Amino acid sequence: MNLHQKHLILLGMMGTGKSTVGKHLAQHLPYPAIDFDHWIEERQNQSIPSIFEQLGESYFRELESQALKHFLKQPQPHILITGGGVILRPENRKRMKKANGVVFHLIADVETLIQRLDLDVNRPLLQGDKAEKIRRIWSERKSLYETIADYRIQTDDRSPEAITTEILSHWH
Ligand code: S3P
């Protein structure tokens, strides 16, 4: 195995399967996998919806930016499972671009995301008209993801194993 010393960064909209794929990748690569949302929840001892509700989105974005900064600085490679909004802050985009890492952008058609997130209750940004919100968020963020992605990985109608295999084919 080619153990190049880079972080493997998973990027993409809510519902593209970053967490699931990240867990699969961790079974194939000898790096710790860090799911930013889980890391923040543990650190705060609070769920993401309750952080948004009680402390506000910008507080959450601050914690997210701190997580990114902290893990990108680690000399040992990690699998970094980011939250969908990590690309919103210019400083985060700059950091990911400059980082010693490879960025995989997981993508799915908006209709697929709407289906996958249909029953979800854990995404504060999708309260209300979920389909409309997903469409709007994607149109606002699409180009931001693109500016830092090294690889685009299509996830529609594909198993986590197949997606993992594709990512690993670029990695080795
Ligand atoms: C968000 C995505 C979520 C979580 C928070 C905000 C976003 O993570 O960080 O609800 O702004 O896209 P996932 O991408 O893991 O769902």
Image: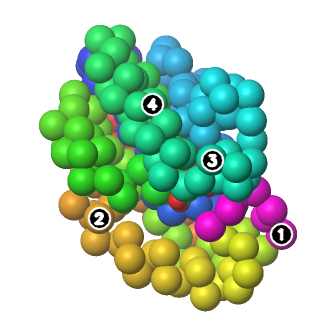
Question: Residue type at mark 4?
Answer: Ala
The quarter of the rendered structure image containing the C terminus is top left
Side of 82 relative to 5 (left or right) = right
Q: Nearer the viewer, mark 4 or mark 2?
A: 4
Residue at point 58% right, 69% down?
156
Q: Nearer the viewer, mark 4 or mark 1?
A: 4
- Between marks 4 and 2, how big is the CA–CA gap? 19 Å
Residue at point 49% right, 83% down?
136
- Between marks 4 and 1, how big is the CA–CA gap? 28 Å
Which quarter holds ligand 1? bottom right
Q: Nearer the viewer, mark 3 or mark 2?
A: 3
Instruction: Give the residue number, with chain letter if any, for mark 4.
Output: 67
The secondary element bearing badge 4 is classed as helix
**Residue 15 percent across, percent down from the top left:** 62, 62
Q: Looking at the rendering, which quadrant does residue 123 occupy?
A: bottom right
- Between marks 3 and 1, how big is the CA–CA gap? 25 Å
Instruction: Give the residue number, with chain letter if any, for mark 3.
Output: 55
State which region is magenta.
Answer: 119-125
Tell me, yes or no, if residue 111 can be seen here.
no
Residue at point 52% right, 45% down?
59
Q: Nearer the viewer, residue 36 or 12?
A: 36
Q: Nearer the viewer, residue 139 or 66?
A: 66
- Between marks 3 and 4, how big is the CA–CA gap? 17 Å
Instruction: Give the residue number, with chain letter if any, for mark 1.
Output: 119
Label located before the other in sequence (4 or 2): 4
Tell me, yes or no, if residue 10 can be seen here.
yes
